[in-house]
DNA sequence: TCTAAATGTCAAGTATAATTTACAAAAAAT
DNA sequence: ATTTTTTGTAAATTATACTTGACATTTAGA
């Protein structure tokens, strides 16, 4: 399912998918796919994303 | 680096690596490697591990 | 409108997570 | 001390995360 918390946290920082992708060194498509929810990133990438957005794992990825 | 919090949470539940592996449907070696810290599991697996151990992502994987 | 930036999505390739099999060493039990 | 369970580790294979490049659609600004 979609990760709406990720999208919300990103837009709250006024970042585009591309900017977040650059910040964590992955492709824009990877960020798009994670927000869309149709795959399963590694924990290292999740942590990098959380740090880029000043959030914790629980805030963005826990369910 | 080693994930000592994972090992501690597992032993606190009196589970072997094999039992945790069975509970989350991966191989024992995968659990061993995560505890040893020399790789980068997927978030889905991390979540399954946390649920099996009654912990949250932040408690086991956040740094 | 018109245009440019941002997002959604696809297909083919590459990197690496996770598996299986196997064996040795450490820890726990008898 | 000896057996049994648990853990550490390695090599070869398979599954899948992630990349690159490309194009269509949506959103935002001029």
Image: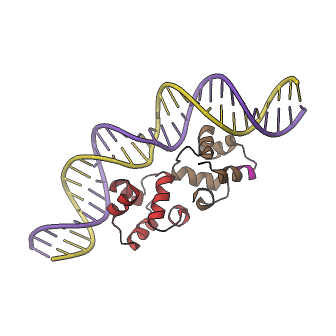
Chain colours: A brown, B red, C yellow, D purple
Above or below A47: residue C20? above
Residue span colored magenta: A10-15
Q: Where is A48 relative to C10, above or below?
A: below
- The question of residue A11 being in magenta is answered with yes
- How many marks can you see? 0
Q: Is B17 part of what is drawn in magenta?
A: no
Q: Position of residue B7 (x, y in %)?
A: 41, 67
Identify the residue at horizontal 45%, vertical 67% (top origin): B53
| Residue A15, placed above or below residue B60 | above
In this picture, residue B57 sits left or right of residue A21: left
Picture coordinates of residue A9 (x, y %)? 70, 53
Task: Residue at 62% x, 44% y: name it.
Answer: A36
**In front: A4, or A28?**
A4
B2 relative position to A22: left or right: left
Rendered-image quadrant of the N terminus of chain B: bottom left
Figure quadrant of the C terminus of chain B: bottom right
Q: Quadrant of residue D3?
A: bottom left
């Amino acid at each position: 399912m979609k990760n709406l918390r990720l999208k919300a946290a990103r837009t709250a920082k006024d970042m585009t998918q591309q900017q977040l992708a650059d910040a964590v060194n992955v492709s824009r498509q990877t960020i798009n796919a994670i927000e869309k929810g149709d795959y399963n990133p590694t924990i290292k990438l999740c942590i990098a994303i959380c740090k880029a957005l000043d959030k914790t794992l629980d805030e963005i990825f826990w369910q």
